[in-house]
């Protein structure tokens, strides 16, 4: 892969307390690993590839811990714009059931492109229904084309409406089929080694769309392999809490604990409705959280108690969540919203700029079990982004505090992105995918699947 030198940065934000920020700093990369970081005189003067980062903040790539890529096809769909989670799902489930392999591949590329251009270098995704001829292999194909470091979570739904679940029977699978394909996906695609570009987790969708038996079996299967983690939605809404209390006689968090779904190999999405005892349990077991502030606001779900979680020692990362409940895949914006939403809940000092940035970098890396990510330091992965500070949106801010400018002002996108030592974005342009062609293809598919399902009367505004 050769060598890469990033030089002349206005500042290098390392996330390494021992190094701090380096004004005028540079980063030297060999193959897919950071070899040296510091002032230009301390680094080699030449490399196979050189990036001039003048006027930029250079920093570790952001990490997304929760998403549903396929939902880019159903952004802003009428009838789902003003619904809370359960009704939102009821409106969209039939549309998602129209997807095929082309739809999954194209929507995955679309979400990944938006993520990369917004500063993301590693992302998980939670695809929990695979209708028609679609497959998780379609997502892998997209990740390999675009160059994003990818955590595929093999999602599933098995509890259809006829069995007391929320999704229609047409979009669920038999549990034997689910577990067989989980094993296939792990054995085909999972790479547990450091600096891996592709890992697999098992991710039954939620307590209201799978059985307890599937949750137990998925946990046993994942733990029979090295480095296969577990992921699901937990305690996202009051409706979910009511569902669990009425159906199982227990709150969502202790329910998941009773099923073996806590531990350093587990991360939950949302976790809004958890109490102090449950937060303490999460910290003690090492269970991580994907915090998704924009989706939580969009669906009116509530505010995750991130401050209390961090104080208790819970691992917390950032997730943009599904593109139909956000409706964006912009990771800098998501991090900014995490900062601001905690201040709505707890006051202006509830979460600092530095803490918010670490949620999207080191925090997310810890949630995904990736110690080699989230920091610029020798021996860490060569996932590096550069953002221009001499822009209109940051005028007057970056001269005072570059990191503050990045989180309190507006980042339109990255100027460059290096993922696993490869330049993926240069001069603000994505190098691996033709965006114009992709957008045309994506919109054609979106129009086709949505027009088959006009707004039901119950979802029409009066």
Image (tube, grey):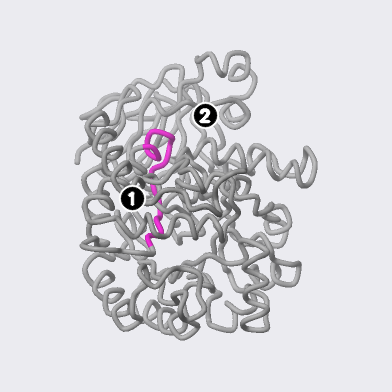
Image position, residue 200 (x, y; %): 34, 65
- Name which of mark 1 and mark 2 comes first in the sequence: 2
- Tag 1–tag 2 contact (CB < 8 Å): no
Which is in the foreground here, disc 1 or disc 2?
1
Please rate how many residues cluster around mark 1, counting C-alpha atoms within 10 Å: few if below 14, some from 14 to 19, many from 20: few
- Looking at the rendering, the stretch of residues picked out in magenta corresponds to 114-127
Which residue appears at 64% of the width and 61% of the height?
A: 237
The image quadrant where one finds the N terminus is top left
Most foreground residue, 22 or 95: 95
The image quadrant where one finds the C terminus is top right
> Does residue 413 sit above or below 262 in this rendering?
above
Which residue appears at 28% of the width and 25% of the height?
A: 50
Label 1 sits on a secondary structure element that is: loop
> Does residue 13 sit above or below 242 in this rendering?
above
Which residue appears at 63% of the width and 29% of the height?
A: 408
Q: Is residue 196 left or right of residue 293?
A: left
Most foreground residue, 148 or 96: 96
Label 2 sits on a secondary structure element that is: strand
Asked if residue 111 lies in the magenta stretch, the reply is no
Image position, residue 145 (x, y; %): 21, 45
Residue wearing tag 2: 22
Please rate how many residues cluster around mark 2, counting C-alpha atoms within 10 Å: few if below 14, some from 14 to 19, many from 20: some
Report the disc number at residue 417. Answer: none
Most foreground residue, 209 or 144: 209
Image position, residue 422 (x, y; %): 26, 38
Q: CA distance from mark 1 to mark 2?
A: 55 Å
Q: Which image quadrant is residue 202 in?
A: bottom left
Image position, residue 46 (x, y; %): 26, 25
Residue wearing tag 1: 452
Q: Is residue 31 left or right of residue 377?
A: left
Asked if residue 123 lies in the magenta stretch, the reply is yes
């Amino acid at each position: 892969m050769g060598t890469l030198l990033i030089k002349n940065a206005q500042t290098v934000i390392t996330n390494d307390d021992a190094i701090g920020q380096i004004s005028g700093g540079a980063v030297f990369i060999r193959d897919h690993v950071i070899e040296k970081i510091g002032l230009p005189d301390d680094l080699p003067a030449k490399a196979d590839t050189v990036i001039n980062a003048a006027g930029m903040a250079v920093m570790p790539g952001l990490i997304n811990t929760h998403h549903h890529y396929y939902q880019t096809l159903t952004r802003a769909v009428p009838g789902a714009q003003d619904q809370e989670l359960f009704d939102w799902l009821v409106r969209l489930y039939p549309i998602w059931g129209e997807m095929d392999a082309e739809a999954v591949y194209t929507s995955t590329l679309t979400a990944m492109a938006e993520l990369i251009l917004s500063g993301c270098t590693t992302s998980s995704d939670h695809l929990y229904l695979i209708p028609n001829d679609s497959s998780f292999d379609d997502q892998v194909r997209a990740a390999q084309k675009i160059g994003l470091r990818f955590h595929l979570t093999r999602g599933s739904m098995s509890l259809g409406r006829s069995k007391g679940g929320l999704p229609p029977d047409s979009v669920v699978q038999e549990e034997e089929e689910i577990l067989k394909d989980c094993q296939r996906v792990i054995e085909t695609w999972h790479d547990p080694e450091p600096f891996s570009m592709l890992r697999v987790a098992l991710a039954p969708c939620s307590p209201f769309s799978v059985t307890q038996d599937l949750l137990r079996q998925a946990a046993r299967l994942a733990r029979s392999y090295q480095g296969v983690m577990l992921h699901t939605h937990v305690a996202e809404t009051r409706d979910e809490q009511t569902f669990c209390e009425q159906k199982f006689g227990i709150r969502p968090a202790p329910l998941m604990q009773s099923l073996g779904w806590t531990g350093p190999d587990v991360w939950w999405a949302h976790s809004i409705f958890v109490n102090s005892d449950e937060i303490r349990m999460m910290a003690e077991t090492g269970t991580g959280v994907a915090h998704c502030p924009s989706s939580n606001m969009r669906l009116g779900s509530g505010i995750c108690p991130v401050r209390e979680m961090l104080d208790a020692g819970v691992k917390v990362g950032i997730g943009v969540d599904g593109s139909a409940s956000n409706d964006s895949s912009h990771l800098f914006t998501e991090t900014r919203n995490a900062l601001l939403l905690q201040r709505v809940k707890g006051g202006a000092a509830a979460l600092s700029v530095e803490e918010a940035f670490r949620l999207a970098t080191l925090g997310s890396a810890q949630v995904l079990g990736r110690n080699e990510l989230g920091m610029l330091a020798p021996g860490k992965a060569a996932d590096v982004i550069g953002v221009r500070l001499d822009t209109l949106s940051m005028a007057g801010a970056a001269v005072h505090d570059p990191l503050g400018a990045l989180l309190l002002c507006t980042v339109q996108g990255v100027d460059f992105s290096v993922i696993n030592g490869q330049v993926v974005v240069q001069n603000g342009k994505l190098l691996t995918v033709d965006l114009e062609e992709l957008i045309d293809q994506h919109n054609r598919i979106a129009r086709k699947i949505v027009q088959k399902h006009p707004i039901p009367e119950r979802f029409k505004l009066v």
